[in-house]
Image: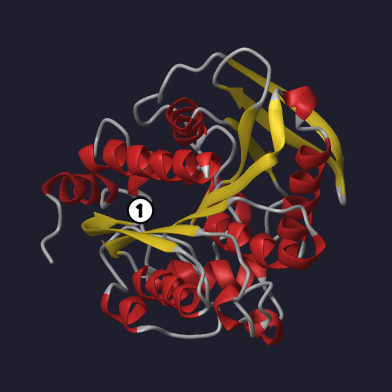
Protein backbone atom coordinates (compact mmCIF):
# COMPACT_ATOMS: atom_id res chain seq x y z
CA UNK A 1 0.00 0.00 0.00
CA UNK A 2 1.06 3.58 -0.67
CA UNK A 3 -0.30 6.38 1.47
CA UNK A 4 -2.34 8.83 -0.58
CA UNK A 5 -0.36 12.11 -0.96
CA UNK A 6 -3.35 14.18 0.13
CA UNK A 7 -3.79 12.00 3.21
CA UNK A 8 -0.07 12.38 3.93
CA UNK A 9 -0.39 16.17 3.72
CA UNK A 10 -3.32 16.04 6.13
CA UNK A 11 -1.31 13.93 8.56
CA UNK A 12 1.54 16.43 8.40
CA UNK A 13 -0.88 19.23 9.26
CA UNK A 14 -2.39 17.22 12.11
CA UNK A 15 1.07 16.42 13.49
CA UNK A 16 1.34 20.05 14.61
CA UNK A 17 -1.28 19.39 17.28
CA UNK A 18 0.07 18.70 20.73
CA UNK A 19 -0.05 14.93 21.46
CA UNK A 20 -2.71 13.82 23.90
CA UNK A 21 -1.61 12.87 27.42
CA UNK A 22 -3.92 9.94 28.02
CA UNK A 23 -3.14 9.91 31.75
CA UNK A 24 -4.81 13.30 32.16
CA UNK A 25 -7.04 13.62 29.08
CA UNK A 26 -10.74 14.21 29.81
CA UNK A 27 -13.74 13.99 27.56
CA UNK A 28 -14.10 17.76 27.65
CA UNK A 29 -10.42 18.20 26.80
CA UNK A 30 -10.67 15.88 23.82
CA UNK A 31 -13.77 17.65 22.53
CA UNK A 32 -12.13 21.05 22.85
CA UNK A 33 -9.55 19.93 20.29
CA UNK A 34 -11.65 17.74 17.98
CA UNK A 35 -15.24 19.04 17.95
CA UNK A 36 -14.72 21.63 15.27
CA UNK A 37 -16.87 22.27 12.24
CA UNK A 38 -16.09 24.20 9.10
CA UNK A 39 -12.62 22.74 8.67
CA UNK A 40 -13.50 21.05 5.39
CA UNK A 41 -15.81 21.58 2.42
CA UNK A 42 -19.40 22.11 3.45
CA UNK A 43 -20.98 19.28 1.48
CA UNK A 44 -23.87 19.35 -0.97
CA UNK A 45 -26.80 21.73 -0.97
CA UNK A 46 -30.02 20.04 0.13
CA UNK A 47 -33.66 21.05 -0.02
CA UNK A 48 -34.11 21.68 3.71
CA UNK A 49 -32.50 21.11 7.10
CA UNK A 50 -34.27 21.24 10.44
CA UNK A 51 -33.70 20.11 14.01
CA UNK A 52 -36.06 18.39 16.40
CA UNK A 53 -35.83 17.19 19.95
CA UNK A 54 -37.53 13.95 20.89
CA UNK A 55 -37.89 12.16 24.21
CA UNK A 56 -34.88 9.90 24.63
CA UNK A 57 -33.88 7.37 27.29
CA UNK A 58 -31.71 9.97 29.02
CA UNK A 59 -33.83 13.06 28.35
CA UNK A 60 -34.14 15.21 25.24
CA UNK A 61 -32.50 13.67 22.18
CA UNK A 62 -31.62 16.05 19.35
CA UNK A 63 -32.00 15.08 15.69
CA UNK A 64 -30.95 16.97 12.57
CA UNK A 65 -33.09 16.16 9.54
CA UNK A 66 -31.89 16.66 5.97
CA UNK A 67 -34.40 16.50 3.13
CA UNK A 68 -33.47 16.01 -0.53
CA UNK A 69 -36.70 17.46 -1.91
CA UNK A 70 -40.30 18.34 -1.21
CA UNK A 71 -42.12 16.29 1.39
CA UNK A 72 -43.28 12.86 0.38
CA UNK A 73 -42.10 9.28 0.13
CA UNK A 74 -38.32 9.53 0.25
CA UNK A 75 -36.30 6.67 1.73
CA UNK A 76 -34.81 7.41 5.15
CA UNK A 77 -31.26 6.95 6.41
CA UNK A 78 -30.58 7.25 10.14
CA UNK A 79 -26.99 8.41 10.62
CA UNK A 80 -24.77 7.96 13.69
CA UNK A 81 -21.60 10.06 13.75
CA UNK A 82 -18.19 8.81 14.80
CA UNK A 83 -15.83 10.21 17.41
CA UNK A 84 -14.95 7.25 19.60
CA UNK A 85 -18.23 7.62 21.54
CA UNK A 86 -16.58 10.67 23.15
CA UNK A 87 -16.22 13.38 20.50
CA UNK A 88 -17.80 14.79 17.35
CA UNK A 89 -21.22 16.33 16.92
CA UNK A 90 -24.00 16.89 14.44
CA UNK A 91 -21.87 19.74 13.09
CA UNK A 92 -18.70 17.73 12.49
CA UNK A 93 -20.61 15.35 10.22
CA UNK A 94 -22.90 17.88 8.58
CA UNK A 95 -20.99 17.66 5.29
CA UNK A 96 -21.24 13.87 5.19
CA UNK A 97 -24.98 13.92 5.91
CA UNK A 98 -25.59 16.56 3.25
CA UNK A 99 -23.80 14.48 0.62
CA UNK A 100 -25.64 11.28 1.53
CA UNK A 101 -28.96 13.12 1.50
CA UNK A 102 -28.53 14.63 -1.94
CA UNK A 103 -26.71 11.77 -3.63
CA UNK A 104 -28.84 8.93 -2.23
CA UNK A 105 -32.04 11.00 -2.62
CA UNK A 106 -32.78 10.09 0.99
CA UNK A 107 -34.01 11.88 4.04
CA UNK A 108 -31.07 11.69 6.47
CA UNK A 109 -31.65 11.90 10.21
CA UNK A 110 -28.46 12.55 12.16
CA UNK A 111 -28.59 11.56 15.84
CA UNK A 112 -26.98 13.54 18.67
CA UNK A 113 -26.58 10.56 21.01
CA UNK A 114 -25.13 10.88 24.50
CA UNK A 115 -21.35 10.69 24.74
CA UNK A 116 -18.90 9.05 27.12
CA UNK A 117 -17.41 9.29 29.69
CA UNK A 118 -20.35 11.22 31.16
CA UNK A 119 -22.72 8.67 29.61
CA UNK A 120 -20.89 5.36 29.06
CA UNK A 121 -22.25 2.18 27.44
CA UNK A 122 -25.10 1.52 26.87
CA UNK A 123 -26.23 5.17 26.68
CA UNK A 124 -25.21 5.78 23.06
CA UNK A 125 -26.78 2.50 21.96
CA UNK A 126 -29.99 3.20 23.86
CA UNK A 127 -30.23 6.60 22.17
CA UNK A 128 -29.48 5.10 18.75
CA UNK A 129 -32.27 2.54 19.10
CA UNK A 130 -34.71 5.09 20.44
CA UNK A 131 -33.97 7.47 17.57
CA UNK A 132 -34.28 4.73 14.95
CA UNK A 133 -37.62 3.56 16.28
CA UNK A 134 -38.92 7.13 16.54
CA UNK A 135 -37.90 7.82 12.96
CA UNK A 136 -39.63 4.66 11.78
CA UNK A 137 -42.83 5.61 13.61
CA UNK A 138 -42.73 9.21 12.34
CA UNK A 139 -41.24 8.69 8.88
CA UNK A 140 -44.27 10.01 7.03
CA UNK A 141 -44.23 13.34 8.85
CA UNK A 142 -40.53 13.67 7.98
CA UNK A 143 -41.33 13.18 4.30
CA UNK A 144 -40.06 9.62 4.39
CA UNK A 145 -41.15 6.08 3.64
CA UNK A 146 -40.99 3.79 6.72
CA UNK A 147 -40.68 0.75 4.45
CA UNK A 148 -37.37 2.03 3.06
CA UNK A 149 -35.19 2.57 6.11
CA UNK A 150 -31.41 2.25 6.46
CA UNK A 151 -28.73 2.99 9.04
CA UNK A 152 -25.32 4.48 8.42
CA UNK A 153 -22.37 5.68 10.44
CA UNK A 154 -18.62 6.01 10.62
CA UNK A 155 -16.25 4.55 13.21
CA UNK A 156 -18.19 4.59 16.52
CA UNK A 157 -21.27 5.37 14.43
CA UNK A 158 -20.47 2.34 12.28
CA UNK A 159 -20.39 0.31 15.47
CA UNK A 160 -23.81 1.63 16.48
CA UNK A 161 -25.18 0.93 12.99
CA UNK A 162 -23.97 -2.66 13.11
CA UNK A 163 -25.31 -3.24 16.62
CA UNK A 164 -28.77 -1.76 15.96
CA UNK A 165 -28.96 -3.84 12.78
CA UNK A 166 -28.40 -6.94 14.86
CA UNK A 167 -30.90 -5.90 17.53
CA UNK A 168 -33.58 -4.94 15.00
CA UNK A 169 -33.33 -8.20 13.06
CA UNK A 170 -35.85 -9.84 15.38
CA UNK A 171 -37.60 -6.91 17.08
CA UNK A 172 -37.81 -4.46 14.16
CA UNK A 173 -38.00 -2.12 12.49
CA UNK A 174 -36.93 -3.83 9.28
CA UNK A 175 -33.88 -2.26 7.64
CA UNK A 176 -33.04 -2.20 3.95
CA UNK A 177 -29.32 -1.56 4.39
CA UNK A 178 -26.46 -0.88 6.78
CA UNK A 179 -23.70 1.44 5.61
CA UNK A 180 -20.67 0.86 7.86
CA UNK A 181 -17.84 3.34 7.30
CA UNK A 182 -14.59 2.07 8.87
CA UNK A 183 -16.59 0.59 11.76
CA UNK A 184 -15.18 -0.34 15.15
CA UNK A 185 -16.43 -3.90 15.57
CA UNK A 186 -14.28 -5.50 18.30
CA UNK A 187 -13.20 -3.76 21.49
CA UNK A 188 -12.00 -7.04 23.01
CA UNK A 189 -9.20 -7.92 20.56
CA UNK A 190 -5.91 -6.55 19.29
CA UNK A 191 -5.81 -7.02 15.53
CA UNK A 192 -2.75 -6.88 13.26
CA UNK A 193 -3.88 -3.55 11.80
CA UNK A 194 -4.26 -2.08 15.27
CA UNK A 195 -0.65 -3.06 15.91
CA UNK A 196 0.89 -2.13 12.55
CA UNK A 197 -1.00 1.18 12.20
CA UNK A 198 -0.66 2.04 15.89
CA UNK A 199 0.98 5.44 15.38
CA UNK A 200 1.19 8.14 12.77
CA UNK A 201 -2.13 7.74 10.94
CA UNK A 202 -4.48 10.09 12.85
CA UNK A 203 -6.34 7.39 14.80
CA UNK A 204 -3.79 5.74 17.08
CA UNK A 205 -3.78 2.60 19.18
CA UNK A 206 -3.46 4.74 22.31
CA UNK A 207 -6.49 6.76 21.38
CA UNK A 208 -8.51 3.61 20.66
CA UNK A 209 -7.62 2.24 24.11
CA UNK A 210 -8.61 5.56 25.68
CA UNK A 211 -11.92 5.53 23.79
CA UNK A 212 -12.56 2.02 25.08
CA UNK A 213 -11.86 3.12 28.65
CA UNK A 214 -14.31 6.02 28.34
CA UNK A 215 -17.12 4.08 26.66
CA UNK A 216 -16.68 0.84 28.59
CA UNK A 217 -15.06 1.61 31.97
CA UNK A 218 -15.91 -1.97 32.93
CA UNK A 219 -13.64 -4.10 30.69
CA UNK A 220 -15.86 -7.12 31.26
CA UNK A 221 -18.51 -5.76 28.88
CA UNK A 222 -16.17 -5.37 25.90
CA UNK A 223 -16.88 -8.87 24.61
CA UNK A 224 -20.63 -8.17 24.68
CA UNK A 225 -21.89 -8.12 21.07
CA UNK A 226 -23.63 -4.82 21.85
CA UNK A 227 -20.13 -3.35 22.24
CA UNK A 228 -18.25 -5.66 19.86
CA UNK A 229 -20.70 -6.72 17.13
CA UNK A 230 -18.05 -8.93 15.52
CA UNK A 231 -18.55 -11.25 18.53
CA UNK A 232 -22.22 -11.93 17.81
CA UNK A 233 -23.12 -15.61 17.53
CA UNK A 234 -25.45 -15.34 14.54
CA UNK A 235 -25.15 -13.06 11.49
CA UNK A 236 -27.92 -14.67 9.45
CA UNK A 237 -30.79 -12.51 8.29
CA UNK A 238 -29.05 -9.19 8.84
CA UNK A 239 -29.62 -6.33 6.38
CA UNK A 240 -27.41 -6.16 3.28
CA UNK A 241 -24.30 -4.12 4.00
CA UNK A 242 -21.75 -1.81 2.50
CA UNK A 243 -18.51 -1.79 4.51
CA UNK A 244 -15.99 0.93 3.74
CA UNK A 245 -12.43 0.46 5.00
CA UNK A 246 -9.22 2.49 4.84
CA UNK A 247 -5.84 0.80 4.49
CA UNK A 248 -3.94 3.04 6.92
CA UNK A 249 -6.59 2.69 9.61
CA UNK A 250 -6.10 0.68 12.82
CA UNK A 251 -9.71 -0.52 12.31
CA UNK A 252 -8.99 -1.95 8.84
CA UNK A 253 -8.88 -5.61 9.87
CA UNK A 254 -12.03 -5.58 11.99
CA UNK A 255 -13.98 -3.87 9.21
CA UNK A 256 -12.95 -6.62 6.77
CA UNK A 257 -13.60 -9.28 9.41
CA UNK A 258 -17.13 -8.00 9.93
CA UNK A 259 -17.80 -8.02 6.19
CA UNK A 260 -16.49 -11.59 6.14
CA UNK A 261 -18.83 -12.71 8.92
CA UNK A 262 -21.79 -11.23 7.08
CA UNK A 263 -20.76 -12.88 3.82
CA UNK A 264 -20.30 -16.27 5.49
CA UNK A 265 -23.86 -15.97 6.84
CA UNK A 266 -25.25 -15.32 3.36
CA UNK A 267 -25.77 -11.57 3.82
CA UNK A 268 -25.05 -9.55 0.65
CA UNK A 269 -21.99 -7.37 1.27
CA UNK A 270 -20.03 -4.88 -0.79
CA UNK A 271 -16.62 -3.80 0.49
CA UNK A 272 -15.32 -0.38 -0.53
CA UNK A 273 -11.58 -0.64 0.11
CA UNK A 274 -9.46 2.53 0.08
CA UNK A 275 -5.95 1.13 0.63
CA UNK A 276 -4.17 4.50 0.62
CA UNK A 277 -6.48 6.30 3.04
CA UNK A 278 -6.61 7.09 6.74
CA UNK A 279 -9.36 6.85 9.32
CA UNK A 280 -11.76 9.78 9.11
CA UNK A 281 -11.03 10.67 5.51
CA UNK A 282 -14.65 10.92 4.33
CA UNK A 283 -15.14 14.03 6.48
CA UNK A 284 -12.16 15.70 4.81
CA UNK A 285 -14.01 16.99 1.75
CA UNK A 286 -11.96 19.50 -0.18
CA UNK A 287 -8.71 18.27 1.34
CA UNK A 288 -8.76 14.61 0.28
CA UNK A 289 -10.24 13.92 -3.15
CA UNK A 290 -11.12 10.33 -2.31
CA UNK A 291 -13.67 11.58 0.23
CA UNK A 292 -15.98 12.78 -2.52
CA UNK A 293 -15.68 9.50 -4.40
CA UNK A 294 -16.25 7.44 -1.25
CA UNK A 295 -19.41 9.38 -0.44
CA UNK A 296 -20.62 8.99 -4.02
CA UNK A 297 -20.13 5.23 -3.86
CA UNK A 298 -21.72 5.01 -0.43
CA UNK A 299 -24.74 6.96 -1.65
CA UNK A 300 -24.98 4.71 -4.71
CA UNK A 301 -25.12 1.68 -2.42
CA UNK A 302 -28.01 3.26 -0.51
CA UNK A 303 -29.83 4.14 -3.73
CA UNK A 304 -29.48 0.56 -4.94
CA UNK A 305 -30.75 -0.84 -1.64
CA UNK A 306 -33.74 1.49 -1.59
CA UNK A 307 -34.73 0.58 -5.14
CA UNK A 308 -34.56 -3.19 -4.56
Residue 231 lies, in percent from the top left, at 59, 83
Q: Residue at x 55, y 78 (%)?
A: 230
**Can the viewer see residue 23 in this picture?**
no
Name the residue: 64% across, 85% down.
233
Q: Residues within 10 Å of mark 1 (few under 14, many from 20)?
A: few
Decide if residue 63 is on the left or right side of residue 9. Answer: right
**Residue at mark 1:** 18
Spot occupied by residue 109 in the image (x, y as percentages of width and height): 64, 35
**Which one is nearer the viewer's eye here, 77 or 41?**
77
Question: Is residue 8 something one can see in this rendering?
Answer: yes
Q: Name the quadrant of the N terminus.
A: bottom left
Quadrant housing residue 74 = top right
Q: Please say if 266 is above or below 46.
A: below
Query: In the picture provided, is 205 more to the left or to the right than 97?
Result: left
Residue lying at 72% horizontally and 59% vertically, measured from the top left: 125
The residue lying at 14 percent from left, 58 percent from top is 3
The furthest residue to the front: 308
Q: Does 83 sit above or below residue 282?
A: below
The picture places residue 126, in percent across and down from the top left corner, at: 79, 58
- The quadrant in which residue 276 appears is bottom left
Tell me residue 9's x, y (percent).
16, 45
Q: Nearer the viewer, residue 106 or 31?
A: 106
State whether residue 189 is above or below residue 84: below
* Total labels drawn: 1
Q: Secondary structure at mark 1?
A: loop
Looking at the picture, the colour scheme in use is: secondary structure
Amino acid sequence: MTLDPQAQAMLQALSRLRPFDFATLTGEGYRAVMDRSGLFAAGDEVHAVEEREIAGPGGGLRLRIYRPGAMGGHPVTVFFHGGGFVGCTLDTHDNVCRCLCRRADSVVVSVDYRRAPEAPFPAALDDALAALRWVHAHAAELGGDPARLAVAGDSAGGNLSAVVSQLCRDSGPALRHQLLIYPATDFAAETESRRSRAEGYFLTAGLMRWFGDQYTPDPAVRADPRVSPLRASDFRGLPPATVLVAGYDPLYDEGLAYAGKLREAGVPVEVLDYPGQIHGFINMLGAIGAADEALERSAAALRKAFSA
